[in-house]
Image (cartoon, grey):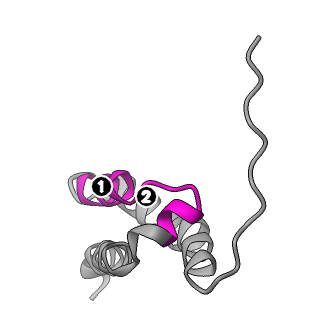
Amino acid sequence: MFFGAPLALTLVALLDAARRPQWAWALAERNQVAWMTMILLGVLLLCGGIAVSGWYLLKVRPEVAAAEAGRVPLRRKPRSRG
């Protein structure tokens, strides 16, 4: 059971990222393909996979889910050139 937990965490994160619509990702100013790629590549490294999947589930997923529910976040400040 303990050894399957990282794989289960990765699978949950990947399935959740895949089921969110592209427009919600765009509203949240996130890239769905990039996150799904990072989660998939994280499977190759145990610690990296846990970190990426955990970050997605704790930080990115709530933003995308909020955008999907109609709660659009405030725009981030653009980076200054100079």
Q: Which residue is mark 1?
A: 42
Q: Is 29 drawn above or below residue 3 in the view shown? A: above
Relative side of 43 to 73, left or right: left
Q: Quadrant of the N terminus?
A: bottom left
Determine contact: label 2, label 1, CB under 8 Å: yes
The magenta stretch spans residue 51: no
Q: Residue furthest left?
A: 44
Q: Is 64 drawn above or below residue 19 in the view shown? A: above
Q: Which residue is mark 2?
A: 52
Using the image as rendered, state which of residue 3 and residue 30 is in the foreground. Answer: 30
CA separation in Å, label 2 and label 1: 7 Å
Q: Earlier in the sequence, mark 2 or mark 1?
A: 1
Q: Quadrant of the C terminus?
A: top right
Relative side of 39 to 51, left or right: left
* Main secondary-structure element of the magenta-colored stretch: helix
**Displayed quadrant of residue 27:** bottom right
Q: Residue at x 74, y 36 (%)?
A: 78
> Which of the numbered marks, if any, corresponds to residue 64?
none
Using the image as rendered, state which of residue 4 and residue 53 is in the foreground. Answer: 53
Which segment is the magenta one?
24-41
Q: Secondary structure at mark 2?
A: helix
Instruction: Locate residue 6, reporting x and y percent.
Output: 32, 72
